[in-house]
Image (tube, rainbow, N blue to C red):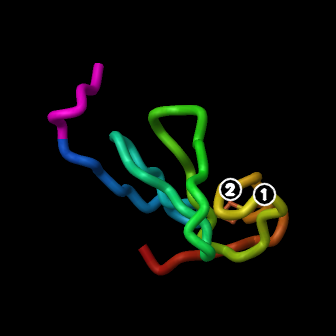
Amino acid sequence: MTTHDEPVSITPCPDGPLLVRGEIELRSADGTLIDPHRHTVALCRCGLSSIKPFCDGAHKTAGFRTEA
Ligand code: FES
């Protein structure tokens, strides 16, 4: 279980999104607060998601590949 005192972690998934765990404040480009509705969020890094900034799994069908 994570508390507010635990550090935020960002973990890149191989060939996939960035998993962000912890209490964060997520905002759109215009500064609007985005409620992630969960404690761990997957942020798209392939650029193909239809629900940016979140990952929708499109990276899989697109064959997105990362170096690590
Ligand atoms: S990383 Fe999953 S849709 Fe972009």
Residue 55's disc number: 2
Q: Nearer the viewer, residue 15 or 33?
A: 33
Please check the rendered image and state whether residue 5 is part of the magenta-colored stretch, yes or no. Answer: yes
- Name the residue tied to disc 1: 51
Percent position of residue 10, x then y: 35, 56
Per the rendered image, the range of residues in magenta is 1-6
Tags 2 and 1 touching, CB below 8 Å:
yes
Give yes or no for residue 52 being in the magenta stretch: no
Is residue 27 or residue 40 the one in the foreground? 27
Main secondary structure of the magenta stretch: loop
Front residue (pair 36, 19): 36
- 53 vs 11, left or right, is right
Query: Helix, strand, or loop for circle 2?
Result: loop
From this view, report whether residue 67 is shown above or below residue 6: below
User: Which residue is depicted at the point 38% across and 43% down?
Assistant: 21
What is the x, y in percent for residue 3?
Answer: 24, 26
